[in-house]
Image (cartoon, rainbow, N blue to C red):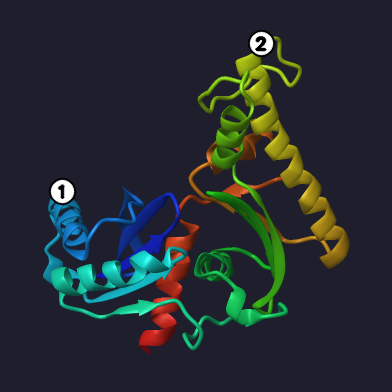
Amino acid sequence: MILTIDIGNTNITFGVFDGDKLSFVSRLATERNRTDDQFAVEFLAVFKMHDLEPAEITGAVLSSVVPELTGKIKTAVNKVCGIESVIIAPGVKTGLNILIDNPAELGADLVAGAVGAMARYEMPAFVIDLGTATKIYAVDEHGGYHGGTIAPGVEISMKALSGQASLLPSFSLASPPHACATNTIECLQSGIIFGTADMIDGMLDRFAKQLGEPKTIVATGGLSSYVIGYCRHNIIHDDNLLLYGLKAIYDKNSN
């Protein structure tokens, strides 16, 4: 079995593959002051919950956008499973041709998402990742990564509004009944949800004008389920896209 781990700014998501089947997915809060021993204890607890023995894990691969946790998670995996992890970094085989100004700048999460799209969907594709930041990027049928766009994420926008505007209250993320809302909370929800959906639609149109129409548009990330249903484009929701991408990268580097 192969352990795949995506270390994000908000959550650490990990999944275990039995062959090509994703057996289970679990999420931990990203807490930067945790030690490798604490992560090891949490991995053991999750494995036990799913009746999985650590010795059944024969390989591991991880992507990280939180450098201070990369080493801790790698060490935790080694302590629990007795294996070394493949870390997504320059030099690892991905199948991508990174066509941006500085390929070394490309985040490991974007690499995993692009490879996941190539592994699972008809290309070319536009990939939307609604996490801490909202990211949209383009991958062609030859594995060319053409770049993308980064905007403030849904939760960042929510916190900025309630934190910087004294008269605006904190509010929860929920689907607003109307675009033109009639109370402050629903006005905020409308702006965040519909505003993000329309931003995504607009950027997808701009991408298509620049690069041509894609065969697939796929969305992932913890907040995608709140927004994608309000977009005009036909968008596939794939919550575990990055984990599938990590598994594909592991396979490329284990042969």
Q: Residue at x 14, y 57 (%)?
A: 41
Q: Residue visible at 60% across and 75% down? A: 105
Q: Is residue 201 above or below residue 161?
A: below
Q: Which residue is found at the position 66% from the left and 10% from the top? A: 183
- Quadrant containing the C terminus in the rendered view: bottom left
Residue type at tag 1: Met
State the image coordinates of residue 202 (x, y, percent, origin top left).
80, 46
Classify 10 Å Cα crowding around label 1: few (below 14), some (14-19), many (20 and above). few
Nearer to us: label 1 or label 2 = 2
Residue 65 appears left or right of 31: right
How far apart marks 1 and 2 lie (CA) works out to 44 Å
Would you name the residue on which mark 2 appears?
183
Give the residue type that dot 2 points to: Asn
Please tell me how crowded label 2 is: few (under 14), some (14-19), or many (20+) other residues with Cα within 10 Å: few
The residue sitting at the top extreme is 182
Q: Residue at x 19, y 54 (%)?
A: 42
**Which is nearer the eye, 240 or 190?**
190
Give left or right: position of 27 versus 153. Answer: left
x, y (%) of residue 45?
15, 52
Q: Nearer the viewer, residue 62 or 127?
A: 62
Whether the residues at callouts 1 and 2 have beta carbons within 8 Å, the answer is no
Most extreme residue toward the right is 209
Query: Which quarter of the rendered picture does the N terminus lie within?
Result: bottom left
Q: Which residue is mark 1?
A: 49
Q: Is residue 239 above or below residue 101?
A: above
| Image quarter of residue 4 | bottom left
